[in-house]
Amino acid sequence: GKDLKWTVLADLKGLRLGGAKGYRYPKEFFDLSKAGHFRLELVVSDDTNLRKLASGDIDLAIFDLVNARYLLNRSPAFLQSKLMVDPKVYTQ
């Protein structure tokens, strides 16, 4: 339900972000989370993050762009209608 606009990670202040355990995220994500800038919740799968996004349990999930599009395209219609992929790629 939210159209989030961001340019740098600092723009995500106060949000709840989802990630998947075992993925390698940039150190900056963890540093900002530890500093309380945003809350980073790690789960066991990207599918879990899709469900958490749709239910409003998190505001944003961190995905590989190709994987995000694949998962969303194969998700049930009710999930597809609630979610969108932001094509912006995080770079350090």
Image: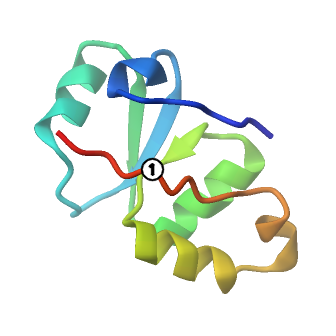
Q: How is the image coloured?
A: rainbow
| Figure quadrant of the C terminus | top left
Residue 7, compared with residue 83, is above or below; it is above
Q: Hey, which quadrant is residue 50 in on the image?
A: bottom right
> Where does residue 24 sit, x and y in percent of width and height?
17, 57
Q: Residue at x 28, y 59 (%)?
A: 21
User: 10 Å neighbourhood of mark 1: few (<14), some, or many (≥20)?
Assistant: few
Q: Residue at x 74, y 35 (%)?
A: 2
> What is the residue that sits farthest to the left in this orientation?
27
Residue 89, compared with residue 5, is above or below; it is below
- Looking at numbered disc 1 in the image, what kind of residue is underneath it? Lys
> Where does residue 33 sit, x and y in percent of width and height?
29, 25
- Looking at the image, residue 31 sits to the left or right of residue 44; the answer is left
> What is the residue that sits farthest to the bottom in this orientation?
74
Q: Residue at x 55, y 64 (%)?
A: 48
> Where does residue 35 sit, x and y in percent of width and height?
24, 13
Residue 31, compared with residue 70, is above or below; it is above
State the SS at label 1: loop
Return the residue nearer the eye: 66 or 51: 66
Residue identified by numbered label 1: 88
